[in-house]
Image (cartoon, rainbow, N blue to C red):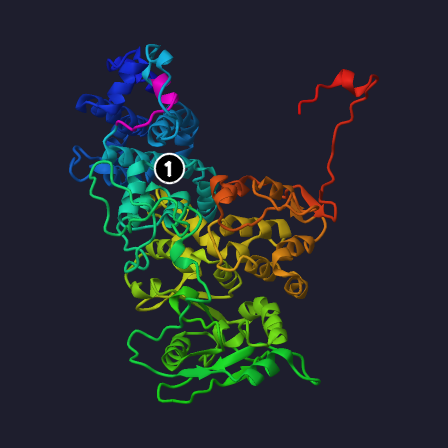
């Protein structure tokens, strides 16, 4: 690649103006020569410009190297390793002066062209015959959109990886004096996403990932992260997602992970829901441990549970805790303990679809109680050994038990339960099947971010409120906060230029609420950012969970009919605390006075399509806030007054 002007390179290489018909045929039937040209232009062009920017000859002089082994420094990894050496010997101030020009002249045009090629227009229809004979240059033809990407799929993926890397490097150079945390935040906000080639999406689909999982992965991770997850076994490999069967455009063989279904099947996995995770009372089953050959249930006595939650005339209600047991303990009754300020305990956060719940009574199989007891006692704590723990299946009366008052009080205490726990331990069957020893922190955080646990609404508050959050892998507990602290100390330029910003976003999606500023608008922003990719099997639970998380009056929400609970949730928000950006949701409620309000903050077709969660990064700090009234959303702000000396009809044109 030799060219001073990136945009005129096609003409210099002989790919001059052609008719739309000729370009269309070439894109649909690309020659090897044309594909090679696109590779030189979009892949080697930006890399060559980086080499010129860094002045590789000066690098060789600084390092006193007569010759460089081309094999040692080949490929992107080699380029980055060479760059790491170079950064130790140059003045970044000089380099930073050249960065804006480099980004404007090379990186931004390359990203734009790559996006037009990668984002295939499958719904545009046939090109108007009247324009087929119009003569255009290559750039103009690409800008109008195409129904195919003429590049080799591997080359398209490599280009996406390279452009993301260079974009992050530009931020790295420009913020060299900032902390690693600030750099990560900048990368998550200002590194504009690079379009992901269809081959990345197809790779996940052929491995059995469902549309909802793919939406989460491709929306939240760069191409390097998506490529990594193609090589990670997906959760619940034994279960096939119900989705429309598709074929790879190159290999028409289909996938063994895809169950053939009709396109209009209502139970299909979609971009905003996974059919495997929609639980119903009619089909739910509590499971035994895998190595259990059959055991009885251990049950919490309902009157003891109610007495702890409700209290008596002399004492208020409290949080019920479970006493762990030894394996040889064969009692059929669970011993409950009333929480007191001097007590320490572990709260268990689990995924109900893994089978640790019970919709009929406060009971679990004996084998599960033994397993949980061992987990709790294995947790290493600075405060001493743990023998007490909390589990919602035991400590919250389920529907239908007739303990409505006790159930309501348990829900009201949900926030306190997780806040007071010394440690929250996460149990996810997929994570527990993966080892953590000798595995990089980055990989473990990425796995946590796409786990089933991280897609459910109730588990969000459990991770957000925890003082200490541990994830149970097959061979050890993983402290996500300690892992992030280690990542912030990393000087690995390969990691920094590829995944740092994405890992920061994934970490903040779990712990951002606890780490955010104390203002309500910042807390609400954290909630919106993470809820767009979470679901719940019971829609009325949304108001309950968010109300507990934001420390609202839970009694009022619980006493409201389920269909109106979200309205009650919004009405409880403090005056002048709700950011005006909340009006940006496209799907709103239909009730008078609340038609401004989002129908849901969770994953839905409208929220996914409108990219709601990607907009909060640009909220003003502090944002303009309003008040919720009986008539609607009210905001007070500055305005302009236009003196009018004629009837309004003479001054303004009104369009209906």
The quarter of the picture where residue 132 lies is top left
- Relative image position of residue 540 (x, y in whole percent): 57, 59
Can you see residue 502?
A: yes
Can you see residue 2?
A: no
- Relative image position of residue 501 (x, y in whole percent): 42, 45
Q: Residues within 10 Å of mark 1 (few under 14, many from 20)?
A: many
- Relative image position of residue 154 (x, y in whole percent): 23, 36
Write the start and end of the magenta stretch as one range: 139-150
Q: Quadrant of the N terminus?
A: top left
- Front in this rendered view, residue 330 or 243: 243
- Front in this rendered view, residue 335 or 48: 335
- Front in this rendered view, residue 26 or 605: 605
Q: Is 196 placed left or right of 281 in the picture? A: left
583 is within the stretch colored magenta: no
- Relative image position of residue 522 (x, y in whole percent): 59, 50
Task: Name the residue rendered at 57%, 68% in the picture.
Answer: 414
Q: Secondary structure at mark 1?
A: helix
Q: Quadrant of the C terminus?
A: top right
The quarter of the picture where residue 33 lies is top left
Task: Name the residue rendered at 26%, 30% in the picture.
Answer: 56
As displayed, is residue 14 above or below residue 180? above
Q: Which residue is mark 1?
A: 169
- Front in this rendered view, residue 255 or 222: 255
Marker count (numbered)? 1
As displayed, is residue 138 above or below residue 286? above
């Amino acid at each position: 690649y030799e060219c001073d002007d990136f945009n005129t390179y096609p003409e210099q290489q002989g790919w001059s103006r052609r008719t739309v018909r000729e370009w269309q045929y070439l894109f649909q039937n690309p020659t090897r020569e044309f594909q090679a040209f696109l590779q030189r232009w979009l892949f080697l062009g930006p890399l060559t410009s980086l080499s010129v920017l860094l002045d590789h000859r000066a690098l060789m002089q600084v390092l006193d190297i007569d010759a460089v082994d081309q094999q040692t420094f080949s490929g992107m990894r080699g380029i980055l390793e060479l760059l790491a050496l170079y950064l130790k010997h140059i003045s970044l101030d000089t380099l930073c002066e050249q960065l804006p020009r480099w980004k404007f002249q090379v990186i931004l045009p390359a990203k734009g062209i790559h996006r037009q090629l990668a984002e295939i227009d499958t719904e545009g229809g046939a090109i108007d015959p009247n324009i087929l004979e119009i003569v255009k240059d290559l750039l103009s033809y690409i800008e109008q959109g195409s129904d195919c990407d003429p590049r080799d799929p591997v080359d398209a993926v490599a280009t996406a990886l390279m452009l993301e890397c260079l974009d992050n490097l530009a931020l790295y150079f420009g913020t060299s004096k900032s902390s690693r945390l600030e750099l990560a935040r900048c990368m998550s906000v200002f590194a504009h996403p690079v379009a992901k080639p269809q081959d990345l999406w197809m790779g996940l689909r052929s491995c059995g990932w469902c549309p909802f999982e793919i939406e989460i992965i491709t929306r939240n991770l760069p191409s390097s992260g998506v490529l990594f997850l193609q090589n990670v076994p997906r959760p619940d490999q034994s279960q096939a997602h119900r989705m429309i069967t598709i074929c790879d455009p190159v290999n028409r063989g289909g996938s063994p992970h895809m169950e053939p279904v009709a396109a209009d099947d209502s139970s299909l996995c979609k971009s905003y829901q996974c059919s495997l995770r929609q639980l119903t009372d009619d089909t739910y089953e509590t499971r035994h441990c895998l190595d259990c050959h059959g055991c009885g249930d251990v049950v919490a006595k309902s009157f003891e549970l109610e007495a702890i939650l409700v209290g008596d005339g002399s004492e208020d209600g409290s949080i019920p805790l479970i006493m762990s047991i030894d394996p040889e303990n064969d009692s059929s009754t669970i011993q409950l303990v009333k929480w007191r300020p001097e007590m320490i305990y572990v709260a268990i956060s689990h995924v109900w679809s893994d089978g640790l719940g019970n919709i009929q009574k406060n009971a679990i199989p004996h084998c599960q109680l033994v397993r949980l007891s061992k987990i709790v006692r294995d947790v290493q704590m600075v405060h001493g050994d743990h023998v007490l723990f909390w589990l919602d299946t035991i400590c919250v009366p389920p529907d239908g038990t007739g303990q409505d008052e006790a159930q309501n009080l348990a829900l009201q205490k949900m926030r306190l339960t997780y806040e007071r726990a010394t440690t929250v331990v996460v149990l996810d069957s997929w994570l527990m099947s993966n080892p953590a020893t000798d595995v990089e922190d980055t990989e473990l955080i990425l796995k946590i971010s796409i786990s089933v646990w991280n897609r459910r609404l109730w588990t969000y508050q459990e991770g957000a409120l925890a003082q200490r959050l541990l994830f149970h892998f097959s061979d050890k507990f993983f402290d996500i906060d300690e892992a992030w602290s280690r990542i912030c100390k990393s000087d690995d330029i390969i990691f920094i230029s590829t995944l740092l910003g994405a890992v920061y976003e994934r970490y903040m999606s779990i712990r951002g609420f606890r780490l955010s500023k104390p203002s309500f608008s910042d807390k609400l922003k954290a909630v919106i950012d993470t809820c767009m990719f979470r679901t719940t099997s019971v829609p009325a639970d949304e108001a309950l969970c968010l109300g507990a998380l934001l420390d609202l009056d839970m009694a009022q929400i619980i006493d409201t009919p389920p269909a109106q609970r979200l309205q009650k949730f919004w009405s409880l928000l403090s005056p002048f605390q709700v950011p005006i950006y909340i009006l940006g949701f496209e799907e709103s409620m239909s009730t008078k006075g609340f038609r401004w309000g989002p129908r849901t903050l969770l994953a839905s077709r409208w929220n996914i399509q409108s990219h709601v969660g990607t907009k909060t990064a640009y909220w003003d700090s502090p944002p303009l806030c309003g008040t919720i009234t009986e008539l609607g959303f009210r905001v007070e702000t500055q305005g302009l007054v236009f003196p009018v000396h004629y009837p309004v009809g003479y001054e303004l044109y009104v369009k209906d």
